[in-house]
Amino acid sequence: MEEFAAISGISRPTLSKFFNDPESVRRSTRERIEKALEKYDYRPNVFAMNQNRSKTKNVGIVVPYLADPFFSEIGRAVELACLDAGYSPILHSSHGSPQLENDNLDSLRSLKPAGVLLAPFGRASDRKFIQEFAREVPLVLFDANIEGAGEAFIGTDNFQSIGLVVEYLCRSGEPPCFFEMKTPSNPNANKRRQAYLEAMARQGHPAHIFQAEGDGWDFEEIGSVEGGRMLADRVFPTNTVLCSNDRLAIGMLSAAYRQGIRVGRGPDCTLRVAGHDDHPFSRFTCPSLTTIAQDYSAIADHAASALFAILESERRPAAREETLFEGKLVMRESA
Amino acid sequence: MEEFAAISGISRPTLSKFFNDPESVRRSTRERIEKALEKYDYRPNVFAMNQNRSKTKNVGIVVPYLADPFFSEIGRAVELACLDAGYSPILHSSHGSPQLENDNLDSLRSLKPAGVLLAPFGRASDRKFIQEFAREVPLVLFDANIEGAGEAFIGTDNFQSIGLVVEYLCRSGEPPCFFEMKTPSNPNANKRRQAYLEAMARQGHPAHIFQAEGDGWDFEEIGSVEGGRMLADRVFPTNTVLCSNDRLAIGMLSAAYRQGIRVGRGPDCTLRVAGHDDHPFSRFTCPSLTTIAQDYSAIADHAASALFAILESERRPAAREETLFEGKLVMRESA
DNA sequence: ATTCTTTTTTTACGCGCGTCAATTTTTATG
DNA sequence: CATAAAAATTGACGCGCGTAAAAAAAGAAT
């Protein structure tokens, strides 16, 4: 940097300011630096930059399971939002392990991040650990909420979205049963069950909840095995099943296919299946899956903005903000 | 560290050695340090550690598209192998953009990585850029090869795997046609086409190749639209289609379902479909997909080992090593 | 016990940059 | 044009650690 200062004719402290925030120097100076930069392509040393800075431009992003395309997509959207705002995103996956969630936060902490965007496991998360973490680092949660942790939460309004699909299913055929995991790792699952119950009450139909054994992240497998068993045993009192998420629904569709059960709205169909999340593969299931599309680019953008607002205000907000986006019904072949 | 040296009764240079490599100090000393570490939980500053080190313990991992579960899984396996070897993996996705591949390598370079594991796009990659990069940083390629770039390549033996599935398909029914993308971004696709041609020649059957228009990473969509069109137009001269990869096959299966074509081995079936890769969702397609399973944990482990061997030997190997693992046939319902 | 070897300690420097205070230069304002 | 305000420069210190050289200590071998 010393050398670059010499040949570019700019003092080193000014260069330092520039690299921290190009907007912080006068425009004429900025242009001179940028011109010199093209000529000599100097790049500051990341490690030396961050050593003396208490707050860096790093933003940690942690999602529970990157192999799930839903988190892959939303992780990407958050990453982009950070880049656009001039931060350096660092994306980590907890790979289904709450312990790894803690490890990820730990390893992020040593990178002195300006803030962290976390999609937590929820119930399975180490709540105390996360709250402790949030005391040191500005933290915004998305997708899954943990009451009282972090400065803000951004997610989908499960009551709205489930209400929407339940209303649709009731209007267009038999009222839906609800299929979910017995011990869901995600708090959205609990919200959705509750939302289902309320929506069915509103519609004046009896509610029927069916819970699959099993834990972990092999949702398709669970949906296929447990859902398949239920189909074979004819436990569903109506011909319509609303699955707590698309991955369970994908499993159930595969089970229905194996059993020769025709799924869809047609007259020859004996089963309707709907999901929630608009998983990237839901368009290609057989039949294609009717589901709820979460507005995850809105969720990602809003979560990032919320964090940046906190970072720029330099102080923690007084009230914890919770923002919920509405889901959209995506009507396809399965229901 | 100074403080921690004082209260633990160990000199600071010894501590420094310890944190670089715990094995480099005498066992009795190591135990004393570890005991003190539990008591005072000091952790060295990552940035200061790496500042004066020309080579860090960072290992960059770059995959072309993390939303593809195949890369998600193999990326994870590589990540784990790095952690086990005491390195700090940093996983980046190029999100389908060759430009971003360059950007990722650039941003990795500023982290002074000890080495980089790259699954490149292949043909679409910026070959010169990557070769330039490899001059600075030890580089090992996996999944997709770029001739002459990097110190080693580890992947699947497409000729073996395609030979295997072609042999199986011929033996168990009509010989397969081959369905692929016209402009594949992945060099494996070219190998597979070639392998198909050779395998069909060996089997004494005429080869039929059908290429879908379209580019990008929406393989399911392309398989569904283009493959569906071909099915409707009855262009396939036999009842068996071998798809270049599972994601195309998933699309084709969805198209077949829409058209009421029964897929599988049964007497009432008029189409057989096979894929390649054993995509995580292939078990849940309708019907479940017969495919080739790549041994990606072996690929990941071997790629990581190859890099570590280079790092520990401190010099570039004389010859470029290419290691190919065999694929395994996974027989399911679709063929 | 002596000698040789390995390990640790002592001492000291420097990495590349952030950042501060004092000063000078440039730009905006009246 | 003078003056105030904003921005840039000068000079200097320190961050937390790597690392080198020389001396001391500990352990191993004879």
Image (cartoon, coloured by chain):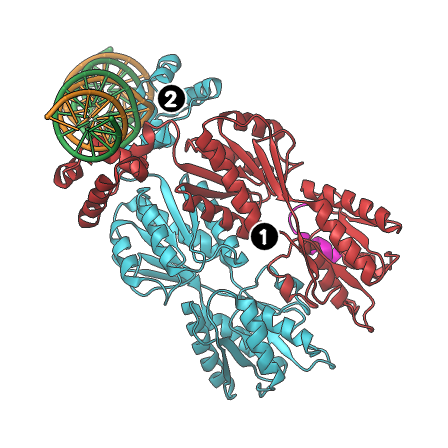
Chain colours: A cyan, B red, C orange, D green
Q: Quadrant of the N terminus of chain A?
A: top left
Residue A275 visible in rendering: no
The residue pinned by badge 2 equals: A29
Q: Which residue type carries mark 2?
A: Thr
Q: Which residue is drawn at the image coordinates 35% and 39% (left, top)?
A: A57
SS state under label 1: helix
User: Which residue is located at x 57 percent, y 46 percent?
Assistant: B299
Magenta part of the protein: which range? B215-225
Residue matched to label 1: B70
Residue that appears at 50% across and 70% down = A161
Where is residue B183 drawn, in percent x and y? 73, 42
Q: Residues within 10 Å of mark 2 (few under 14, many from 20)?
A: some
Residue B279 inside the magenta-drawn segment? no
Relative to D15, residue B296 above or below:
below
Q: Which amino acid, by three-letter code, is at mark 1?
A: Phe
- Rendering coords of residue B89 (x, y %): 43, 42
A149 sits to left or right of A199: left
